[in-house]
């Protein structure tokens, strides 16, 4: 997607991420709420969401993460995106790798 974020890094805005992924902002907002509830991110009023400093690597890959990804895939299928298009986007995002600058 955007590469690997490190503790303290700012998350992309809900609107920005939803636009980039072509999904409903409500889906992204729900994922952000779930990550905050799980202690992966925190919100700073007026500044955005950030990766928690003490987040454990194992918490980043959870059943909930897979569930959120499944919901996003369901949604893009619902709106008619082809599997080949989704795979192409995933491959492009993985190629960006670690340290990808989300501000561009």
Image (spheres, rainbow, N blue to C red):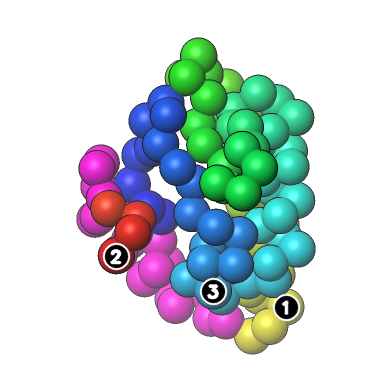
Q: Earlier in the sequence, mark 3 or mark 2?
A: 3
Residue sitting at x 37%, y 30%? 6
Q: In the displayed structure, does residue 56 sit left or right of residue 103?
A: right
The x, y position of residue 53, in whole percent, is 47, 19
* Residue wearing tag 1: 78
Residue at mark 3 to residue at mark 2: CA–CA distance:
14 Å
Magenta-tinted stretch: 81-100
User: Do we see residue 35 in this rendering?
Assistant: yes
The quarter of the picture where residue 19 lies is: bottom right
Disc assigned to residue 58: none
Disc assigned to residue 19: 3
Residue at mark 1 to residue at mark 3: CA–CA distance:
16 Å
Residue at mark 1 to residue at mark 2: CA–CA distance:
29 Å
Q: In the displayed structure, does residue 20 sit left or right of residue 28?
A: left
Residue sitting at x 52%, y 67%? 16
Q: In the displayed structure, does residue 47 sit left or right of residue 80?
A: left
Q: Is residue 85 located in the magenta-colored stretch of the structure?
A: yes
Tag 1 secondary structure? helix
Q: Residues within 10 Å of mark 3 (few under 14, many from 20)?
A: few
Tag 3 secondary structure? helix
Tag count:
3
Q: Residues within 10 Å of mark 2 (few under 14, many from 20)?
A: few
The x, y position of residue 12, in whole percent, is 48, 54
The x, y position of residue 31, in whole percent, is 69, 47
Residue sitting at x 35%, y 55%? 102
Observer-nearest of 53 and 83: 53
The answer to whether the residues at label 3 and label 2 have Cβ atoms under 8 Å apart is no
């Amino acid at each position: 997607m955007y590469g690997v974020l490190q503790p303290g890094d700012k998350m992309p805005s809900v609107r920005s991420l939803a636009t980039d992924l072509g999904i409903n902002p409500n889906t992204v907002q729900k994922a952000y709420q779930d990550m905050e509830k799980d202690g992966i991110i925190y919100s700073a009023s007026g500044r955005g969401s950030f990766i928690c400093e003490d987040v454990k690597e194992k918490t980043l890959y959870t059943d909930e993460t897979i569930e959120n990804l499944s919901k996003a895939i369901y949604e893009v299928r619902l709106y008619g995106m082809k599997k080949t298009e989704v795979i192409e986007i995933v491959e492009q995002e993985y190629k960006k790798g670690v340290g990808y600058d989300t501000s561009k």
